[in-house]
Amino acid sequence: MFEAVNADPRDRCLAELLPTGGTLFNTVCPVSVQSLDSLDTFYEPASSPTGRLLFLREASQPLGITAMNSALMLSDGSNPLAATVIQPYPHTASNGKIHQGIAQIRWLTDTRAVYLAQKVLYLSACGSCPTDTVRTGIEVVQLDLSGPAPTSSIVPNTDDVSSIDATADPDQIIITRNGDSRVYQLTISTGNTVILHDFGTGKIVRDAQVRGNRLYAITGGRISFVVDPVLGSVQKDESGQLVTVDLSTGNSSPMFVTGRFFRRPAVSPGGDHLVAEGFEATITQCGPVCADTTISKVADLWLFDLP
C-alpha cells in the first residue's frame, strides 16, 4: 500500500510498505531542480484495482503558509514522478464553488473515482499565536478517466460532506456530514441517501467505512463545528475515538488504545485489518466538571487485526 512519509525536511514522499506493516520497501520523492528551493510534497495516494495512482502534489516556499501551486496527479503506479496533471488547485467548480483542496480520493472502478473537495483556512487564535490549517469538506466530486481527457462532475446532495468511502457497488458511497452524528449511504446517480447509523446528539462522526455488516468510524474527541457568518461551515478535527458498529444490531463498541485518539482509518478490502493514524492525547482536569484535551501534532501508524 502507498502512504505519505517525511523522508527529507523539505519533502513529503510517497512510500510503499506491506499491508501487514513493517519496513518501507520503496520511497518516491520529488527530484527536480524546482524542488531544491521549495517544500515539495506528495500526499493522499489512492491506488486503483489495476494499480493506477491518484495523488496530490503541492509546492510551497520553505517558510510559506499557503502553497504556491498544487494539483491532482495521475500515474500508472510504477513511476509517480511521471504523473500527469488531472486538476490544478484551487479551482472554481461548475457550480461556482471554489475548491481549495481535496482529500479522501476513492476509486469506484478502474476509470472512475470520487474525492472530497475542501475549503482550506489558515486560522490563528490570536495575533501572535501559530497559524493552524483547517480543512472543511464542501462537496463530493466524481472523476471520469475513461475518455481521452478526464472529466469531473459534482455528486448531487453532497453539500457539507465531511468524509467519503467507496463500497462494493460503484454507484454507492458512504458519507458523513459536517457537525452530524449520522452515517449515510448515498447513491451517486440520484443523490438519494439512507441512514446507516446515528451515534447520537453531540457525537460528530467522520471517516466512516463499511465492510460487510461492520461500520468503522471516528466519533467525538477533539473536534468542533461552527457556521461562521463570513467563512461558512468550519469543522476543525484533531482526532477522536475509533469505534465499530454491528449494523445488524446497531450495537457500537469503542476500539480503545490508552492515551490515543485516531484519524483517517483505512479498512482493508477483506475487512480483516484496519490502519489508522494514532495521536497521543493528554487529558488534564481543569476543574470538577472541566477537562482539557491536548493532541500531539505527530502521529504514528497503527495496525489493528479485526475479527
Image (tube, rainbow, N blue to C red):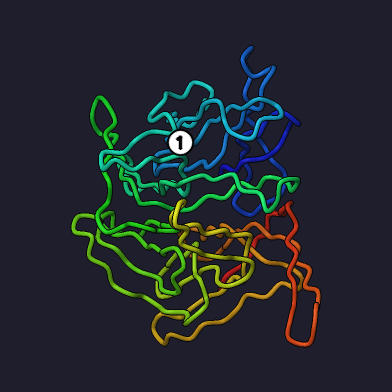
Residue highlighted by disc 1? 53
Q: Amino acid at mark 1?
A: Leu
Secondary structure under tag 1 reads strand
In this picture, residue 189 sits left or right of residue 47: left
Q: Residue 170 versus residue 273: which sits nearer the camera?
A: 170
- Picture coordinates of residue 281 (x, y %)? 75, 66
Q: Position of residue 154 (x, y in %)?
A: 27, 46
Q: Residue at x 44, y 58 (%)?
A: 162
Task: Report the front residue among 20 and 234.
Answer: 234
Which corner quadrant of the image does residue 182 belong to? Answer: bottom left
Residue at the spot 38% in from the left edge and 58% down from the top edge: 160
Q: In the rendered view of the protein, which quadrant contains the N terminus? A: top right
Q: Is residue 77 left or right of residue 283?
A: left
| Nearer to us in this view, 278 or 23 | 278
Residue 27 on image: x %, y %: 65, 32
Q: Residue, x 45% and y 39% (percent of image)?
A: 100
